[in-house]
Amino acid sequence: MASSETAARSDRDRAGRDTPSGDRKASSGDLAGLEAGLDALESPGGAERVPVGRILLTKVLPPIVAIALVLAVWQIAYWSDVQPDYLLPSPGDVGAVFGEMWREGTLLEYVWTSVSRGILGFLIAIAVGTPLGLLVARVKLVRAAIGPVLTGLQSLPSIAWVPAAIIWFGLTNGTIYAVVLLGAVPSIANGIVAGVDQIPPIYLRAGRTLGASGLSSVRFVLLPAALPGYLAGLKQGWAFSWRSLMAAELIVHSPDLGTGLGQLMENYRTMQNMSGVLATIILILVVGVAIDLLFFSPLERRVLRSRGLMARLT
């Protein structure tokens, strides 16, 4: 009897000692499963792909409906004689201007003249605004001296620079690019300053601990960490450069410069051709929207998604 009771007690003690270990193993397995699930959710392949029909319904159909409503209201206003025909042409009249430019082979030429200028001016603005923004963000004395000036320049209408640029550079491409730079550089510089200001201090300390200093710190710590703010500044900088370009092309006229969209709109205004003016405005709007949809929006989604700040859409 005594031996059997001793054996029973030893079995119970052994079971009691084994139970916490088993619980720990089970808990460890649960944590591993939880981590695997979180990893699957964060990985690009962990999210379900949105059906094509849903994409068409939520992304493609709304802008088409909005455009259709605008055209309908425009046509109704034309039929209602809100303004004389020469002041408010119909959508068909504006479409006829597009058709005429297409038949003449000048439509793409006008667009490319402005787009090529805008892209080149924007790239130069990036080359100037990025180091300037880094300098303002990291050197307190420079920020105190230049920071308010950058903010003031960003709020200054770009067209205000056109008369001064004409005096400086004459009726040349230099005038146009000067206006574009003065419009875009402050936005790009302020964007990277805002991005650097939002970097957690621990990132900078970790970079210094790992030996990052000087240009290596800028390349491997500052720019990657400030990328969302920097990208927002680039997006705004493109908008300012495009607006500045149109302002410059409206005023700077010369046969040697070619005909961009701003110059085209001014030509139609001189001829009192309201259909041509509206057609050019639509072209300017379409180019601005296309650049954003084809370049900036995908890049922004990619950056945000890579940092876990945006759910995968497709």
Image (cartoon, rainbow, N blue to C red):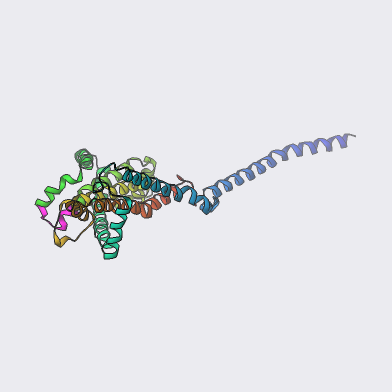
Q: Residue at x 58, y 48 (%)?
A: 36
**Most foreground residue, 124 or 27:** 124
Viewed as shown, does residue 285 lie left or right of 162? Answer: right
Magenta-highlighted residues: 168-178
Asked if residue 257 shows in the view, the reply is: yes
**Most foreground residue, 186 or 143:** 186
The total number of labels drawn is 0
Q: Residue furthest right?
A: 1
Q: Residue furthest left?
A: 167
Viewed as shown, does residue 298 lie left or right of 127? Answer: right
**Does the magenta-highlighted stretch encompass residue 174?**
yes
Figure quadrant of the N terminus? top right
| Image spot of residue 25 (x, y percent) | 66, 44
Viewed as shown, does residue 309 lie left or right of 127? Answer: right
**Does the magenta-highlighted stretch encompass residue 95?**
no
Asked if residue 312 shows in the view, the reply is: no
| Image spot of residue 303 (x, y percent) | 41, 50
**Most foreground residue, 258 or 203:** 258
Q: Residue at x 17, y 60 (%)?
A: 257
| Image spot of residue 248 (x, y percent) | 18, 51
Secondary structure character of the magenta stretch overall: helix
**Most foreground residue, 177 or 61:** 61
Viewed as shown, does residue 266 lie left or right of 201? Answer: left
Splitting the image into 4 quarters, where does residue 15 fall? top right
Rendered position, 299 above or below 196 = below
| Image spot of residue 125 (x, y percent) | 24, 52
